[in-house]
């Protein structure tokens, strides 16, 4: 199924008489293709635009190319590079008072800050985006709304998260951009699985409907198949594997992990590899494979503390404590139980930070968008 947004972009390209206008549409198309996962097509367009923009610079085109470069890096999991490119886009747009692109780049910087759990920065970026975006600037509004929904969802604040997810749908419909809906489906399903897992392992309060998790993952995969999105074709099976572990379907979960963990690095999921290894360790233990369980959990514990979300770290420590206990390593079990308790407490503090900080975002939205 062809996206209405892409159809309109192609029509604008065909009708453009001014070369700069045409190049701006091409940059928008490259960004869309990157979000959809059509990496080679996006790279081909951007390579050509880099040469053109270097020989005949135009401010708006420069901003759009940097935004597209940043989104391409983002879907590849190159977060630092994505942040640099989009910060440059934001600075250029701000210097020239190009408010629509300033709002859009601020929303994307908010998304990156969310992924890095830099929530104070996320609040600031979202406030900027909502204050600058006009009510019909759906690119900025859709991205900022998606980040807002995810933040509330991570904090287990179900009612406001659902309100923001509904706004994402509205903006995506107005824009005709299926990549926005795809991102909404993926991120919502991912956070739902994490919330259920965190409740099971860390006793973190949640009202997630546990019976819907697998249904939502399957509907996400079906939607991507329908619209031709390929950027997250590894992520969805890995979500399914996580649910299967929680449901104690260990053989099925291991089959998926063995097929997908190596592939996941190419789709920007490298920071989650240690979380997946903690799951495979637990599966192996429950299937009576003690040496494989010991191997995998020790690999899982080698994660970089600066690049793993605090609830993922808490999960790894909790798994390690349970595994070491059953392997007869009481010292390892106790040490990891202590680390887990500390990490879970920090995660609750993160949820409280989100609940407080999002009030600033709500105020900016209410003031400028309603």
Image (spheres, helix red, strand yellow):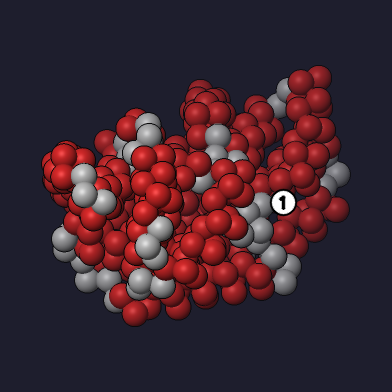
Instruction: Give the residue drawn at x 57%, y 43%.
Output: 265
Q: Please state if 218 lies on the left or on the right of 24 as rendered.
A: left
Residue 369, above or below 50: below
Looking at this view, is 330 or 45 the one in front? 330
Whole-percent x and y of residue 130? 38, 47
Q: Counting other residues with Cα less than 10 Å from the Cα at mark 1, is it few (<14), some (14-19), or many (20 or more)?
A: some
Looking at this view, is 272 or 189 the one in front? 272
> Could you tell me which quadrant the N terminus lies in?
bottom right
Disc 1 is placed on an element classified as loop
Q: Please state if 333 lies on the left or on the right of 78 as rendered.
A: left
Q: Residue furthest top?
A: 55
> Could you tell me which quadrant the C terminus lies in?
bottom left
Q: Is residue 127 visible?
A: no
Whole-percent x and y of residue 346? 17, 42
Number of callouts in the render? 1
Q: Quadrant of residue 54?
A: top right
Instruction: Give the residue drawn at x 48%, y 56%.
Output: 142
Whole-percent x and y of residue 46? 75, 36
Q: Quadrant of residue 26?
A: top right
Looking at this view, is 277 or 205 the one in front? 277
Residue 53, above or below 334: above
Instruction: Give the residue drawn at x 21%, y 49%.
Output: 328
Whole-percent x and y of residue 238? 50, 60
Q: Is residue 329 visible?
A: yes
Instruction: Give the residue drawn at x 36%, y 40%.
Output: 298
Residue 54, above or below 109: above
Residue beneath label 1, please? 38
Q: Please state if 227 lies on the left or on the right of 348 as rendered.
A: right
């Amino acid at each position: 199924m062809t996206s209405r947004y892409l159809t309109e972009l192609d029509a604008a390209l065909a009708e453009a008489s001014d070369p700069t206008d045409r190049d701006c549409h091409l940059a928008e198309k490259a960004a869309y293709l990157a979000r959809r996962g059509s990496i080679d097509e996006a790279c081909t367009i951007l390579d050509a635009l880099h040469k053109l923009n270097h020989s005949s610079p135009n401010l708006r085109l420069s901003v759009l190319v940097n935004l597209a470069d940043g989104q391409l890096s983002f879907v590849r999991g190159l977060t630092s590079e994505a942040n640099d490119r989009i910060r440059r886009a934001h600075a250029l747009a701000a210097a020239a008072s190009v408010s629509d692109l300033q709002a859009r780049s601020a929303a994307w910087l908010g998304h990156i800050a969310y992924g890095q759990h830099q929530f104070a920065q996320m609040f600031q970026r979202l406030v900027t985006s909502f204050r600058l975006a006009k009510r019909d600037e759906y690119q900025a509004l859709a991205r900022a709304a998606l980040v807002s929904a995810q933040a509330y969802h991570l904090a287990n604040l179900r009612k406001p998260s659902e309100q923001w997810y509904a706004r994402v749908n509205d903006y995506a419909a107005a824009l005709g951009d299926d990549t926005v809906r795809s991102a909404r489906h993926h991120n919502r399903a991912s956070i739902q699985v994490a919330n259920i897992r965190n409740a099971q392992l860390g006793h973190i309060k949640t009202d997630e409907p546990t019976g819907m998790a697998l249904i939502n993952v399957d509907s996400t995969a079906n939607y991507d198949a329908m619209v031709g999105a390929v950027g997250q074709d590894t992520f969805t099976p890995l979500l399914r594997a996580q649910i299967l572990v929680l449901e104690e379907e260990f053989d099925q979960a291991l089959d998926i992990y063995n097929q997908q963990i190596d592939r996941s690095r190419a789709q920007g999921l490298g920071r989650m590899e240690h979380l997946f290894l903690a799951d495979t360790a637990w599966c192996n233990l429950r299937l009576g494979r003690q040496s494989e369980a010991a191997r995998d959990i020790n690999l899982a514990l080698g994660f970089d503390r600066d690049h793993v979300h605090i609830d993922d770290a808490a999960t790894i420590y909790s798994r390690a404590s349970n595994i070491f206990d059953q392997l007869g390593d009481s010292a390892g079990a106790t040490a990891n139980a202590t680390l887990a308790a500390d990490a879970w407490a920090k995660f609750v503090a993160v949820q409280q930070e989100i609940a407080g900080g999002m009030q600033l975002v709500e105020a900016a939205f209410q003031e400028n968008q309603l």
